Image: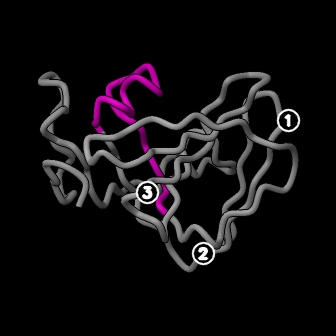
């Protein structure tokens, strides 16, 4: 399948060719700060599958709980979050599902895993059927 997406203003576009992806929510405090919300929703894909087809995203390096770099890519024009490359997961990229086209932000209606549930706000319940990981891994 081909996933396509972009930032809000259209300056950055990307594609990822994948057989399938892992639908993941991340509740870590880094994702909370970056998204301005309780979690990020992510389509986790092989890093080699993601291709930026228009524009050049900016990036910001944050140090995660692991002590390793979380490289956040975003549009410098509109500020949209695009994807994250985690040093702890060198073969994978976490595409922010909200930027996906064709209503793919719903991630086929099923979340596979929730990461950093230790940081999940108390007002949110676990997603039924999703693997619950206290941290990443």
Q: State the residue at coordinates (18%, 25%).
A: 121
In percent of width and height, residue 129 lies at 18, 59
Of mark 1 and mark 2, the one earlier in the sequence is: 1
Identify the residue under disc 1.
11
Identify the residue under disc 2.
18
Secondary structure under badge 3? Answer: loop
- How many angstroms separate mark 1 from mark 3 (CA)? 26 Å
Of mark 1 and mark 3, the one earlier in the sequence is: 1
- Mark 3 or mark 2, whichever is nearer to me: 3
Which residues make up the magenta segment? 27-44
Of mark 3 and mark 2, the one earlier in the sequence is: 2
The quadrant in which the C terminus is found is: bottom left
The quadrant in which the N terminus is found is: bottom right
Compared to 60, does 100 lie above or below? Answer: below
Crowding at label 1, few (<14), some or many (≥20) Cα neighbours within 10 Å? some
In percent of width and height, residue 25 lies at 34, 46
- C-beta proximity under 8 Å, tags 3 and 2: no
Compared to 83, does 79 lie above or below? Answer: above
């Amino acid at each position: 399948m081909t996933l396509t997406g972009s930032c809000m203003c259209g300056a950055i576009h990307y594609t990822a060719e994948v057989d399938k992806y892992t639908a993941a929510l991340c509740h870590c405090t880094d994702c909370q700060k970056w998204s301005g919300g309780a979690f990020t929703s992510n389509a986790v894909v092989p890093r080699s599958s993601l291709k930026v087809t228009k524009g050049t995203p900016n990036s910001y390096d944050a140090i995660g709980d692991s002590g390793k770099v979380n490289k956040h890519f975003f549009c410098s024009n509109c500020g949209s979050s695009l994807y994250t490359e985690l040093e702890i997961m060198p073969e994978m990229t976490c595409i922010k599902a909200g930027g996906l086209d064709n209503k793919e932000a719903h991630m086929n209606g099923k979340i596979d895993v929730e990461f950093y549930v230790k940081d999940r706000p108390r007002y949110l319940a676990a997603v039924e059927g999703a693997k619950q990981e206290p941290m990443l891994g």
